Image (spheres, rainbow, N blue to C red):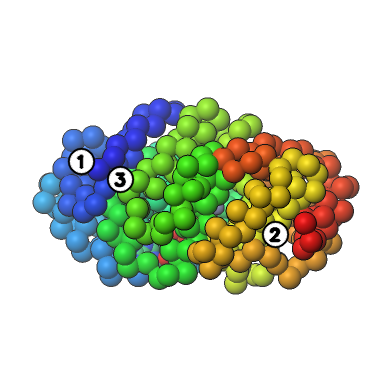
Amino acid sequence: MKTIRVTASKTYDIIIGTGILETAGALMRNTVGGQIAAIVSDDTVAQLYGKKLADILAHSGYRTVSFVFPQGESSKNGQTYLSLLSFLAEEKLSRTDVIVALGGGVAGDLAGFAAATYMRGIRFVQIPTSLLAAVDSAVGGKTAINLAGGKNLAGAFYQPDAVVCDVTTLATLRPEVFRDGCAEVIKYGMIADRDLFASCEKPIDTQLETIIARCVEIKRDIVTEDEFEAGNRKLLNFGHTVGHAIELLSGYTVSHGQAVAAGMVIETRLALRLGVCTEPCLHKLVSMLERYALPVSTSYDAATLAQACLSDKKRDGTSLTMIFPREIGSCVLQDIPVGELEALLHLGLEDSV
Ligand SMILES: NC(=O)c1ccc[n+]([C@@H]2O[C@H](COP(=O)([O-])OP(=O)(O)OC[C@H]3O[C@@H](n4cnc5c(N)ncnc54)[C@H](O)[C@@H]3O)[C@@H](O)[C@H]2O)c1
Ligand SMILES: [Zn+2]
């Protein structure tokens, strides 16, 4: 078991271990408190772990109530959010009670935004059950829902009071969902830790506790330095500028992890063309992604991708920030003028290096 302490606008622990769901009740009783625990999960996760968690929390003296929504990104919307808030009010949760997100990033983002806004902020615990949630969305305090105009357009920075990651829950993930998380793990290796990157040569699922803990430490360190994304937190967006464009253009039929994988390759090839990194860096990235059956290219052309990148909300006026690797384990932020984007993406898409 590993405990990682986060000291941001709130101080709390992220606990990662095997079989530790059993201890979630005692942990919450000791560190978070409250009388009522509202468990928020999608129908897939609720069926697998909902009753188990409710029993564990009841055993530690919580009155448990469950809010279950249909699985999938399309549930991360205003309607589900408002019905969750109404549910919390009907169940009479007070500010000292606790919302527990049990599931992947969708449950975490939705429950987190509800926790940030219900009565102007209520206690909140994350129990991530997807690899992506364990290494990324459950860490760092970003919460959000989607609007018709785009992904994550309404949200809040709201840190949880505790995160409990029981790696045994990841065993039931569909392989393609697990692989989406692998893309993010590879991303952490690229931006911050060449040893982590190298360790992915051995299957990630055989070393989950160590790898998740390392990714969480990296994100913790970046978020501690830049909680509200004024600078270095943007490093976490490596592969995401182009990745988000691919997701958007595909109407979200290409999954996040797949889009980010292709995005990392395109951004790295661009870095290579501009002399920021060397050829082995690109080749190592490509072969690592292929090892996890993740895509390393896209069929969209530079003009189409550029258009989609420019509709991303993270753009500041006349330029956007792209993240370029210098070598495996080290990346830099690079401002790209909007007018040069299409030509640069063209360089990133060229197959010959
Ligand atoms: N807040 C952040 O910082 C942050 C960071 C990255 C991603 N996100 C968000 O996270 C979301 C994606 O997360 P995700 O990939 O976990 O999506 P998800 O929550 O939809 O989970 C993916 C699928 O896996 C299933 N699942 C989850 N845990 C399972 C388990 N243990 N066993 C079997 N099935 C399981 C879910 O039912 C779902 O079908 C997106 O909405 C994205 O915007 C947020
Ligand atoms: Zn991501």
Which comes before the other along the chain, label 1 or label 3? 3
Q: Residue at x 84, y 42 (%)?
A: 337
User: Where is residue 298 drawn, in percent x and y?
Assistant: 70, 67
User: Where is residue 203 drawn, in percent x and y?
Assistant: 41, 59
Helix, strand or loop at mark 3:
strand
Q: Residue furthest front?
A: 280
Q: Which mark is residue 245?
A: 2
Q: Nearer the viewer, residue 203 or 93?
A: 203
**Which residue has dot 3 on it?**
16
The local crowd at label 3, few if under 14, some if 14 to 19, many if 20 or more residues have their Cα within 10 Å, is many
The local crowd at label 1, few if under 14, some if 14 to 19, many if 20 or more residues have their Cα within 10 Å, is some
**Which image quarter: residue 84?**
bottom left
Q: Residue at x 75, y 47 (%)?
A: 272
User: Where is residue 280 drawn, in percent x and y?
Assistant: 66, 50
In three-dimensional space, the C-alpha distance between marks 2 and 1, rounded to whole angstroms, equals: 40 Å
Q: Residue at x 47, y 42 (%)?
A: 195
Q: Residue at x 65, y 55 (%)?
A: 283
Helix, strand or loop at mark 2:
helix
In three-dimensional space, the C-alpha distance between marks 3 and 2, rounded to whole angstroms, equals: 33 Å
**Which amino acid type corresponds to the residue marked 2 in the rendered image?**
Ala
**Which amino acid type corresponds to the residue marked 3 in the rendered image?**
Ile
Helix, strand or loop at mark 1:
helix
**Which amino acid type corresponds to the residue marked 1 in the rendered image?**
Leu
Q: Is residue 56 above or below residue 95?
A: below
Does any portion of residue 34 appear in the rendered image?
Answer: no
User: Where is residue 116 drawn, in percent x and y?
Assistant: 43, 42
